[in-house]
Image (cartoon, rainbow, N blue to C red):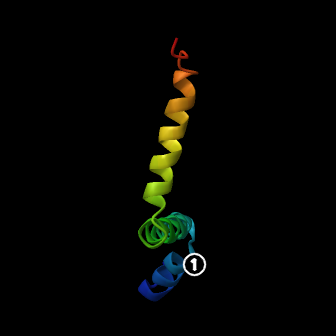
Amino acid sequence: MKTYAESFAARLKREEGQTIVEYGLVIGGISLVLITLFIVADLGQVFEDLITAIGDAMDGPEAAPE
């Protein structure tokens, strides 16, 4: 029968849950970078302009006044 210390050491060697935590940290880091870019570079305005341009392009050419 394993001792408590051997059992605990075996649990520390398992890496099943560590991968999920690592992915979570990477996603969190990327999110922080994107949020910082939105705040610092005012990318919100850039995206608003882009969405407006896409909306205008989807409306098609307006009829020319007669």
Q: Nearer the viewer, residue 6 or 49?
A: 49
In the figure, 63 relative to 33: above or below? Answer: above
Residue 37: x, y in percent?
49, 69
Quick check: 19 left or right of 39?
right
Q: Residue furthest bottom?
A: 5
Q: Residue furthest top?
A: 66
The answer to which quarter of the image holds residue 36 is: bottom left
Q: Residue, x 54% and y 64% (percent of image)?
A: 23
**Amino acid on which disc 1 is placed:** Lys
Residue 60 shows in this picture: yes
Where residue 56 appears, as percent x and y from the top left, is 51, 31
Is 30 left or right of 48, judged from the image as shown?
Answer: right
Is residue 2 among what the camera can see?
Answer: no
| Closer to the camera in the image, 15 or 6 | 15
| Residue at disc 1, secondary structure | helix
Q: Position of residue 10 (x, y in %)?
A: 54, 78
Q: Position of residue 47 (x, y in %)?
A: 49, 51
Question: Residue farthest to the front?
Answer: 66
Q: Which residue is mark 1?
A: 13
